[in-house]
Structure formats: C-alpha cells, structure tokens
Image: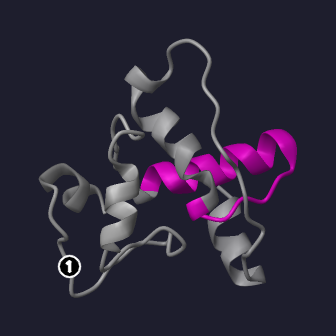
C-alpha cells in the first residue's frame, strides 16, 4: 500500500511477509488509494522488531494484548522520532493471538 500510495499506481506484490497480517496489503484496492488522497499526509513503514517491541511494551505497561497490526501505530512512534511531536494518537486493537503467539511475541 505504501509503495502504491507514493507512486500513485496500484503495485501488486506476489506475497507479503509480516506478522502484521491484518494490514498486509498484497493488492491495493484502487478506491482505497483514492480515499487516501487528500487525507493522508504520509505513510511510514515499521520493522517487525518494532512491532514486537510495541506489543511487549503495551502488554508489560498496561496488560493490553495488542495484535501485530493493532500496534503498528505504536511501532511507528518507537521507530520514527519525527512522529513524537505534539499530541499524538494511535488506534490500538487486537487480542487476536494464539497462546503460542502470546508466548513467542509478548515474553521478552
């Protein structure tokens, strides 16, 4: 989605490889790209390590189990200092983890 948004062209990927499968976009919907124009200032990418860190931090500080896609905003704040200016809000959602994923991703 990020590459499609930047180039203003639908870029299809043969596959996506991320634990954040809820926001993994292999084939962007053209209407979604059109909806982003005029309302989205920027799109940032985050690493798997930042997603893991955000999940562990949210869990250890507040007891909230966020799924990988649901903590992407926190991962962005961890990874991109420029986003931490003024008031910042991000949506957190989730709990869609298996017991094995919780053991693997929430325990440092």
Asked if residue 4 is positioned above or below residue 73 in the image, the reply reads below
The quadrant in which residue 1 appears is bottom left
Percent of width and height locating residue 17:
35, 77
Residue depicted at x 58% and y 41%? 74
Of 64 and 32, which appears nearest the observer?
32
Question: 67 left or right of 20?
Answer: right
Identify which residue, 6 or 46, lies in the foreground: 6
- The local crowd at label 1, few if under 14, some if 14 to 19, many if 20 or more residues have their Cα within 10 Å, is some
Work out whether residue 46 can be spotted: no
Q: Which residue is mark 1?
A: 12
- Secondary structure beneath dot 1 equals loop
Residue at 45%, 54% in the rendered image: 49
Residue 25, picture quadrant:
bottom left
- Identify the image quadrant of the C terminus: bottom right
Q: Is residue 16 above or below residue 9?
A: below
Most common secondary structure along the magenta stretch: helix
Residue at image coords 56%, 63%: 69
Q: How is the image coloured?
A: one colour
Taking the magenta stretch, the answer to whether it contains residue 59 is yes
Q: Specify start and end residues of the magenta stretch as a single range.
A: 49-69
| Residue 44 position within the rendered picture, expressed as x and y whole percent measured from the top left | 34, 44
Q: Position of residue 75 (x, y in %)?
A: 51, 45
Q: Residue furthest bottom?
A: 14
- Residue 3 percent across, percent down from the top left: 20, 58
């Amino acid at each position: 989605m990020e590459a499609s948004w930047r180039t203003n062209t639908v870029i299809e990927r043969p596959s996506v490889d991320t634990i954040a499968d809820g926001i993994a976009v292999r084939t962007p919907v053209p209407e979604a790209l059109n909806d982003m124009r005029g309302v989205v200032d920027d799109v940032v990418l985050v690493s798997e390590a930042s997603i893991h860190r955000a999940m562990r931090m949210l869990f250890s500080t507040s007891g909230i189990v966020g799924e990988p896609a649901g903590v992407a905003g926190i991962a962005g704040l961890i990874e991109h200092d420029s986003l931490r200016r003024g008031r910042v809000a991000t949506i957190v959602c989730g709990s869609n983890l298996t017991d094995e994923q919780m053991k693997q991703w929430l325990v440092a």
